[in-house]
Amino acid sequence: MITLSVNGQQHSYDGDPSLPLLWFLRDEAGLPGTKYGCGEALCGACTVHLNGEAVRSCAVQVADAAGKNVVTIEGLDPHGNHPVQRAWRAVNVPQCGFCQAGQIMQAAALLATTPNPTDAQIHTAMAGNICRCGCYQRIESAIRTAATGV
Amino acid sequence: MTHIEKNSLPLVENVSRRGLLKGVVASGSLIVATTYLPKRAMAAWATGAGLMPHGTVSDPHVFVAIAKDGTVTIVAHRSEMGTGSKTSLPMVVADEMGADWSRCRVVQAPGDEVKYGNQDTDGSRSLRHFVQPMRQCGAAARLMLEMAAAERWGVDVSSVEAVDHAVVHRDSGRRLGFGDLAEAAAALPTPAPDKIRLKDTNSFRYIGTGSVPIVDLFGITTGTATYGADIRLPGMKYAVIARPPVLGAKVKSFDGSAALKVPGVEKVVEVQGWDWPAKFQPVGGVAVIARNTGVAIKGRDALKITWTDSPHAVYNSDSYREMLLENARKPGKTVRNDGDIDGAMKAAAKTITAEYYIPQSAHAPMEPPAATAWVHDGMCEVWAPVQSPGGTHDDLMKTLGLPYDKVKVNVTLLGGAFGRKSKCDFVLEAALLSKTLNAPVRVQWTREDDIQHDFYHAVAVERIEAALDANNKVIGWRHRNAAPSLFSTFMPDPKMQQPLEYSMGQVDLPFAIENIRCEVCEAPAHSRIGWFRSVRNVPNTFATQSFVAELAHATGRDPKDMLLELIGAPRIVDPRKTTVDLWNYGDPFETYPIDTGRLRGVVELVAEKAGWGRDLPAGHGMGIAVQRSFLSYIATVVEVAVDGKGNISVPRVDTAVDCGFHVNPERITSQIEGAAIMGLGIAKHCEITYKNGVVQQSNFNDYQVVRIDEAPRVTNVYIVPAGWDTPSSGVGEPGTPPFAPALCNAIFAATGKRIRNLPIGDQLAI
Ligand code: FES
Ligand code: FES
């Protein structure tokens, strides 16, 4: 039995410990805000915070999260008002929206360590997050908005 | 309009009205607008909406419900895949009825075209076909509220007016909120069309302002918006399916014993497949059922399956390309013939020929197909991200043998679609499995499934020859293409492009050239083909707009001047007489002619805004391209920077859009920004190749799409202002086609290297 904390709540899993954390979150813990886009750490749709760091939950085994704190998009802010979420809304970033949980989690992790990122730092940090709808211009602008305060 | 007792939401229901309006459509009228035309809408335009299955419905009893507290609930009947139509169409209703948007809520309709009218969310049709019905719906709702208030006060209805969520009596200033009037208004019959008056367009509060964010914005940013794979039902099983690697193959035998040993795997079952061509029926395969999706994927890896042989195993992209080139070098079937092309070629002082290759590609929406189904007690309910709620409903009925009212298609948000989710094979798979397992089932496609079993954007060779006279005037234009047809998905393979396809960028050529011939050449299909954002406009525009720049270079002219010269004077181009079955995107040519004035307009606008001809840093170049597609006129200027190693970046894109009367300029801008990025992906990366009938790519490592660090730095969008007298046209698709040719023209300007084969890949590497 593996136990882990997700958004401040204790969860446990009695199945195969090598299960990708993504599927535990989505199908077992009932937290579908974290999305599946590739399963191979190529798209960033599944990004969550593991002990504060942005990770691809499709590439982390549930066993690797044992005893650790996982934060998903549902738990980023109790009211959905994290500065990055507010900036995303101020700039009208999303089109279909499917990639945006991963984008927001990645951007929040970036700003936690780099409060005023340069363009190059934004690109490096966000290059693993695909948006097939093509919201990149607005993602970049929302990150700057969040950095400067909304 | 329905009156709601509580704030919770019963779905709006009114069967008798629905029957009435359905009659309008069923009477065979092509033109719903003329049969249901409010007075002030005399300038309104005819569309082909009535030709779509179940036409249009504009009855407020179907679309609008008002609660006692004044909350107005508006039904969105088109699917939301990122274009914003789930917000824009209800906003049209709200604006027209005088509602306060902050007191409106939007609910997504299930698939029910008998009730709501056509729901096929593709073809860039949502605004184009429904802005009029939704204005009429809002205006009728407003009149019903006004009639209810007038009756309450015992005054003439002409003395009252609905504004800001209330009806006001002009003389006395008396006022009743929408909530107070809900019950009485909902009891009224829908007013006769000739009683309805549309608002003055200059009194709109939301339409045209771009001030209304999408209704799911908060849900999307907090992870609470619901997509296809986000439904969890009690007792639900999780499934992934191994599908035949070659089109047309079937399961010969399989051994699920190793899969069943994977902890958490519950069952291995075969999924029924249909013989090709099968439209959107599943291709079949073997499903692994497990306690969660991750376990099911692991179980699938352990399956051992033998597949039958298929004639499509002959598909090899390298040799197929050679065959297409060969076929395009021979005369094909003539589908447009103006003047005497052979005479022009003979008389030419010079001829110029170019061959372009545009590869097969996959849609790869961020959300791979996924659906949940529950078949039980003679009923089927599904939850799915489908562009075709009505078509999915029909296909479920047929596949399961159920009557209309025993099928329910709940439409979730679509995590991108681009045409892929018009095809409901993944929903049918879930339903078939649910029936077999007697339990709710969610089927998840992996990214590998998505990339290897798509309904693809077809490969094309485009060959254009021009005849020039001694003064470098273009006197002849012959355009041949060889590309497999999407109709091969629906019928025995016609082995060449069909009217719907060649009318997107080939025969609708808007140039002032006397001798034009368009031919389509043989190209058998070996994969499932569908429609991808802007469909054949992508390869056709790449060829025609690259070729214009090639002609400019060959004759020493500026590419923009060359383009305007070929377009010629402002006029209506009507190729119908010289074309075999010109398809005008399903809409009347009279409403949406090919107007070179508007085409020139966007070219001139974008050239001016982009600063065409301005001084550029070394290694930079500018390119231009234009296309009328999905009845809109769109021109793009790309500025490219090519470094010493041949790496390209895009500092700036400018696009001018003339899409007629429009509702939400902010969402138009976002569509065009996204189209530039998708266009860049088409140009630089996207390619699906085959070996012995098997797709060689599998995920975003080898099927690359554009990431943030290579996206255009700035995309400026200019929307041509338009009033109600200019019919609305498409926005979702037409941003895509001009990008790749504008980029490659820019690369030529920067480097002198002409890209004729996509993707660019490492062709520029030094
Ligand atoms: S699903 Fe994890 S990176 Fe794509
Ligand atoms: S908004 Fe659709 S994939 Fe990013």
Image (cartoon, coloured by chain):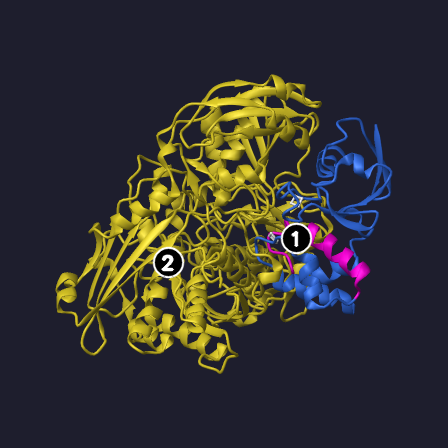
Chain colours: A blue, B yellow
Callout 2 amino acid: Ala
User: Ligand 1 near label 1 (Cβ, under 8 Å)?
Assistant: yes
Q: Which residue is mark 1?
A: A128
- Using the image, name the chain to which the residue with label 1 belongs: A
Disc 2: which chain?
B
Q: Which label is found at residue B327?
A: none
Instruction: Give the Cα distance between marks 1 and 2.
Output: 47 Å
Local crowd size for mark 2, using a 10 Å CA cut-off: few (<14), some (14–19), many (≥20): many
Q: Position of residue B304 (x, y in %)?
A: 55, 22
Q: Secondary structure at mark 2?
A: loop
Q: Residues within 10 Å of mark 1 (few under 14, many from 20)?
A: many
> Is residue A99 shown in magenta?
yes
| Front residue (pair B228, B326) | B326
Which of A55/B625 is in front?
Answer: A55
Provide the residue span drawn in magenta. Answer: A93-115
Mark 1 and mark 2 on one chain: no
Res B604 quadrant in image: bottom left
Please give left or right for residue A1 compared with residue B587 in the image.
Answer: right
Position of A45 with respect to B326 (left or right) is right
Residue B96, placed above or below residue B565: above
User: Would you say the residues marked 1 and 2 are in contact, meaning their CB atoms lie under 8 Å apart?
Assistant: no
Whole-percent x, y for residue B403 in the image: 48, 27
Q: What percent of the width, then of the height, locates residue B543?
A: 35, 60
Quarter where residue B570 is shown:
bottom left
Residue B46: which numbered mark, if any?
Answer: 2
Magenta span: chief secondary structure:
helix
Residue B497 in sight: no
User: The disc labelled 1 sits on which kind of residue?
Assistant: Gly
Question: CB at mark 2 closer than 8 A to ligand 2?
Answer: no
Question: Which residue is at 46% across, 39% downward?
Answer: B695
Give the residue drawn at x 13%, y 65%: B346
